[in-house]
Amino acid sequence: MCDNDIYFITRLKKNAAMTILEEYKLPKGDHNSMSDCKVITGQENGNTKMTNPLRLIIAASDEKNIYVFLPIGLI
């Protein structure tokens, strides 16, 4: 999908394996972002490892609600 310029956002499973490739610096100021990084998902020794990197964004709306997003194609 990435090679065909198809973009979408998906949720991440709780048990998803991933490797962080790069962490992006968050802007200063008042925002809900907790983390922003480039990752590869899947098992290193399995056949589920993706070849294209994804962007992983973690944000909170309040202390109880934390959201994890994988916007595909936004690297």
Image: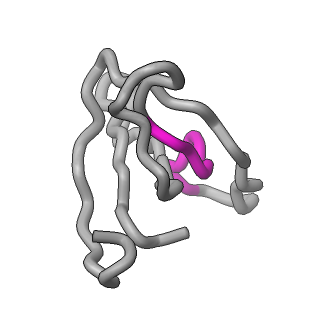
Residue 9: % across, % down: 26, 60
Residue 6, percent across and down? 26, 78
Q: How is the image coloured?
A: one colour
Quadrant of res 13: top left
Tell me the magenta residue range: 31-41
Q: Position of residue 66 (x, y in %)?
A: 35, 32
In the foreground, 22 or 5: 5
- Along the viewing direction, whichever of 66 and 8 lies nearer the viewer: 8
Residue 17 against residue 49 in the figure, above or below: above
Q: Closer to the camera, 25 or 44?
A: 44
Query: Residue at horizontal 60%, vertical 51%?
Result: 38
Vertically, is 57 above or below 28?
above
Nearer to me, 30 or 46: 46
Magenta run includes residue 38: yes
Q: Which quadrant holds residue 75?
A: bottom right
Residue at figure coordinates x 36%, y 63% from the top left: 72
What is the chief secondary structure element of the magenta stretch? strand
Q: Quadrant of the N terminus?
A: bottom left
Residue at horizontal 40%, vertical 26%?
63
Is residue 43 shown left or right of residue 26? left
Q: Is residue 46 above or below residue 68?
A: above
Q: How many marks?
A: 0
